[in-house]
Image: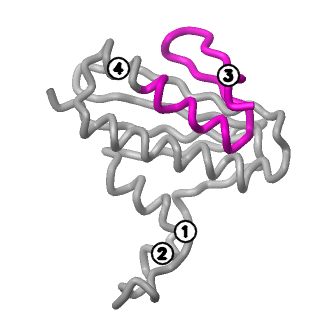
Amino acid sequence: MAGECTVNTETLLTLQSRLDAIALIWPWLESLASEYRIPAETQFAVDLCLEEAVSNVVRHGYDAQTDQPVTVEFKAGADELTFTIEDHAPPFNPLLDTTTENAPAASSIEEFPVGGLGILLMKKFAKNLEYKALDDGNRLTIRFPLGR
């Protein structure tokens, strides 16, 4: 159920590996935006990237397992925001997938590829993406510039 999540502190969100849990990211992000004065356009970029990353973990990393944790940690720096997503899924470095980056541009909406564009969007909206394989999972760190 989407209502099941744990907020250990105001800067740590723990979700269960279900697509409906992704709906909890926006309200959590709104509370952070209010407290840390995150501009609306940055908030939009963060939400897009977090939803894409968590969705990929749930759909591809955990496959059909609905009881696995996905954590999102937030840290605010002087000039950037950092979101770190961790899971216990099999190791997968999303930054190595360049299939859509090297694909020819679509000439019409009918030719536009379905799927595979999430990482490309994340690279466009984030300042920096870093991946680290963990002993028991994955860590994706996403940084955003904090323009006030």
Q: Residue at x 43, y 74 (%)?
A: 101
Give the Cα separation between the discs numbered 3 and 4: 22 Å
Q: Is residue 50 left or right of residue 92?
A: left
Q: Is residue 53 left or right of residue 31?
A: right
Mark 1 vs 2: CB contact within 8 A: yes
Mark 3 vs 4: CB contact within 8 A: no
Image coordinates for residue 108, horizontal then vertical, percent: 36, 88
Ranked by sequence position, the earlier of labels 3 and 4 is: 3
Q: Residue at x 72, y 50 (%)?
A: 91
Examine the rendered structure and indicate whether residue 89 appears above or below residue 76.
below
Q: Nearer the viewer, residue 136 or 67?
A: 67
Q: Quadrant of the C terminus?
A: top left
Give the Cα separation between the discs numbered 1 and 2: 6 Å
Q: Nearer the viewer, mark 3 or mark 4?
A: 3
Amino acid bearing label 4:
Ala
Q: Is residue 123 left or right of residue 94?
A: left
Ranked by sequence position, the earlier of labels 1 and 2 is: 2
Amino acid bearing label 3:
Cys
Q: Name the disc covering residue 5, or none.
A: 3
Q: Quadrant of the N terminus?
A: top right
Image coordinates for residue 8, horizontal then vertical, percent: 62, 10
Image coordinates for residue 24, horizontal then vertical, percent: 57, 30
Which residue carries the number 4 mark? 76
Give the Cα separation between the discs numbered 2 and 3: 33 Å
Q: Which residues are magenta?
A: 1-29
Which residue carries the number 2 mark? 100
Which residue carries the number 1 mark? 116
